[in-house]
Amino acid sequence: MDAVSRVRAASCRAVDEVEPTGLREIITGQIESDSPTFGLATIVVSEEVRHTDEESIIVDSKAAGVQLIYEGLRLTQDLVRENRWKNNEQKLITDMDLLAADVMVARGFYLLSHTKAAPKAVETIRAFGITEAEWSDTPIGTPTRRMNLERNIFELAIIAGFVSSSSEMPSEFDTKQLLNFDISKESKDHILRLIQTIEQGEEEDFLLVISSGK
């Protein structure tokens, strides 16, 4: 099974018991509609950068956790910024989509809650809430930085890939260092595209700095 299929399969397993069926179908449709970009990054970091000794099912679970959180937060962002509640004809659909987004974030966090990536997951979700609250108070037409979410999720993906029960994340890590590791060309191209996409919406160097807490 290729990495894309692994992330999607693990994500679908995480929501397999969600009811009603219609809600679950919205979630699985979201999972299968786009490439699991950030979940793939977790697998690349875990297996090609760190050469983990973790079982693939654990790696896949962490990758799915990252991707589900992203899909849920991104869907929430789209719903809020498009003001879909103003369209009465779409209100029921919008309510279901918002519920699906909440479930994806919750299930994604559950998958990471027992890992060392959990604090970053909490930070990412909290930062998203703050950013969207600030956006709602911003006058219409004011430029906004849409890459905050993607930047935080990419950092979460890297952390989830690095950490395990026996390993820690470096206290300071420049994401571009990932390109210096002996990884496949396909993986290197994937990471490079992610970095370039995020940098387009950033005003500063894209540097991942993680406090060791010591």
Image: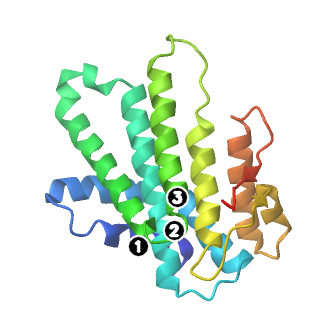
Q: Nearer the viewer, residue 197 or 50?
A: 50
Foreground residue among 213 and 25: 213
Alpha-carbon span between mark 1 and mark 3:
21 Å
Residue 151, placed above or below residue 29 = above
> Measuring 25% from the left and 35% from the top, which residue is drawn there?
94
Q: Residues within 10 Å of mark 1 (few under 14, many from 20)?
A: many
Q: Nearer the viewer, mark 1 or mark 3?
A: 3
Mark pair 3, 2: CA separation: 16 Å
Q: Which dot, 3 or 2, sits closer to the camera? A: 3
Dot 1 or dot 3, earlier in sequence? 1
Mark 3 lies on residue = 119
- Identify the residue shown where x is 43% and y is 51%: 71
Q: Secondary structure at mark 1?
A: helix
**Kind of residue sitting beneath label 3:** Pro
- Where does residue 101 sit, x and y in percent of width and height? 33, 47
Residue on which the image places disc 2: 63
Q: Residues within 10 Å of mark 2 (few under 14, many from 20)?
A: many
| Residue labelled with disc 1 | 10
The Cα–Cα distance between marks 2 and 1, rounded to whole angstroms, is 8 Å
Q: Quadrant of residue 48?
A: bottom right
Q: How is the image coloured?
A: rainbow
